[in-house]
Image (cartoon, coloured by chain):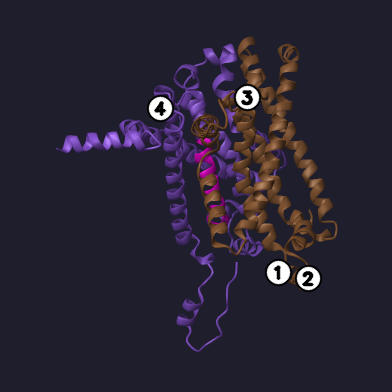
Amino acid sequence: MDALFEYRQALIDGILITLALAFFSLLIAVGLGLLGALAKLSERPAARACADGYTTVVRGVPDLVLMLLVFFGGQQLLNSLGGVTGWWDYIEVNQFIAGVFTIGVIFGAYMTESFRGAILAIPRGQIEAGLAYGMTSFQVFYRIIAPQMVRYALPSFTNNWLVQLKTTALVSVIGLHDVVYNAFVAGRTTRQLFTFMFAVLVIYLVLTAISDVFLRWLGRYYSKDMRSATR
Amino acid sequence: MNGSFLSSLRTLIETYAPLDVIVIIENFDRFLYGVLVTLELTFLSLALGAMLAIPLAIILASDHRIGKFLVASYTYLFRGTPLLIQTYLIYFGLGQFAWVRESLLWDPILSQAWWCALIAFTLNTTAYTTELFCGAIKATPKGEKEAAIACGFSAAGRMRHIILPAALRRALPAYSNEVIFMLHGSVIASTITLQDILGVGRWLNGRYYLAYEGFITAAVLYMILVFFITRVFRYSEQRWLAHLQPRSTREIGAGDKGGMPPTLHVR
C-alpha cells in the first residue's frame, strides 16, 4: 500500500491519459457511427457497400492487431506518402493519436450497428410525416430522428462504451503511458506487480461503475415520456 | 525453366508488390502454428468456461442469497475490468508472493505463460457465459416449469431435462458472439510472450524490420477464422433452433393446401 501511495502521481497521470483517450476516441466513434448508420440506411448501393465493408472488416479483426497495424504501419504509410508527394518530411505517429484513431474506428463500427438499429426503431410514418410537412432531410434528421435515436440507442451505446473503456487498456502495448503502463513500470520497479495490477483492476472497476450509473440516469432522462419502458 | 520462372516471379513481386509476400510465404508454417496456438487457447478456455458457467448460472438464477451474491460479485469483477489486466495480474502479479512461488503449482503451471493465459481467459469467459446462461434460464416460460412440476419432476430433474436443454439452445445466438469475442481476446496472449497468430506477426515484423506484413497476415487469418466460426454457428442454429425459425410462406402453403390461411411467423 505504501508503494501505491508513493507512486500515486504516476497512477493519476495515467488515469487522466486513459480518460482523455476514451473521451476522444468516443467522439470519433460517435461521428463514424452516425456516418456509418446513415450510409447503411441510404439508398445508394455504393454507400451501403462501403459501410458494410467497414463494419465487416473491423468486427472480424481483433482490436490489438488493428492498433499495432495503425501504429507501426500508419507511420510507414504516412512517411512513404510524404516521400512520394513531398508534402512533409518525417512524421512520427504518436501513441496517443494512434490509440485514439484505432479505438475510434473500431467502436465506430459497433456504434454504426447500434445507431442503425435505433433509427430503424423509429416509426417510418414519423419520417414520412416530416417530409410531407416540407422539411428537408437534414431537418427530419435533426428534429425527428436524432432526439428519439438517443433513447433507442442508449442501451447498446452503454454497452459499447463499457467495452470501449476496457479496450483503452490495450494502448499500453504500443507504449502510451496510460494507467496500465505506469502501474506496470511502478510495479516492476518496486517488485510489487500484483499490488499495482490489482490497483488498476480496481480503478477500471470504479470507472465502469461510474459510467454505468451515469448512463442509467441518462437513460431515465431520455425516456421520461415512456415511463413504463424504463427499468 | 521452372526455377527461372519462380525467380522471375520473385523479382516481379519484390519490385512491384506493396507487401513482401515472399517473407510471408517463407514463414507461413509459423503462422499455421500460431493459428493452432490461438485455436487451442480459445477453444480450451471456452470449453472449460462453459462447463464452469452452467452450475454458476444455475446458482445465479436460483433463490440462494449468499450463492447469488458470490457469483454476481465474481461476474461483476471479471466483466468490469479489461482482460489484459486480468492476464497481467495472473502472469506477472502472482510471482510477487513467496508462497505462490514456493507452492507445487508454480513450476509446472503458474510460471508458464501458456497456463496463465488459459487461466485468465477461462475465468473471463466463464463470467460472461454465466450471465448469458443465467439470462437464458430465467427466460424459460413459466408454463414449462409448472408442467414439469405437475408431471412430478424433482427440482434437479426439472433443471436437467426441461430447463437446461431449452435454455442452452436459446443462448446459442448470443454465445456465438462470446466465441468471437474470446477469439479476439486471445490476442492478449501475444503480450505475455506467447506465439499465437499475432505473436508470430509481431515476431515477423521485428525480425525482418517490417511494418505491415506480419500484422496484415494476422488480420487476414483472424478474419478467416471469424468467417468459419460464424458459418458453424449459423449451421448449428439451423439444426438446434429449427423450431424457432420463422417458417417461410412457401413451406406453409405446401403443407396445407387450401386449408387455413397461411400465418406469418415474425420474430
Q: CA distance from mark 3 to mark 2?
A: 51 Å
- Between disc 2 and disc 1, the foreground one is 2
Q: Give the residue furthest to the front.
A: A86
The residues tagged by marks 1 and 4 sit, at their Cα atoms, a distance apart of 52 Å
Q: What residue appears at the point 56 percent right and 26 percent down from the top-left corner? A: A89
Residue topped by disc 3: A176
If you read the primary sequence from the N terminus, does the residue marked by circle 2 or circle 1 appear first?
Answer: 1
Task: Return the mark for residue A134.
Answer: 2
- Look at label 3 and name its amino acid: Leu
Identity of the residue drawn at 35% across and 37% down: B16
* Chain B drawing hue: purple
- The spot of residue A121 in percent (x, y) is 69, 62
The answer to whether the residues at label 1 and label 4 have Cβ atoms under 8 Å apart is: no
Disc 2/disc 1 C-alpha distance (Å)? 16 Å
- Closest to the observer: A229 or B60? A229
Between B33 and A62, the one nearer to me in the picture:
A62
Q: Is residue A191 shown left or right of residue A146?
A: left
Q: Which mark is residue B248?
A: none
Mark 4 belongs to which subunit?
B
Q: Chain of mark 1?
A: A
- In terms of secondary structure, what is the magenta stretch mainly? helix
Does residue B262 lie above or below A70 as drawn? below
Is residue A9 inside the magenta stretch? no
Q: What chain is colored brown?
A: A
* Residue on which the image places disc 4: B204
Nearer to us in this view, B69 or B65: B69
Q: Secondary structure at mark 4?
A: helix
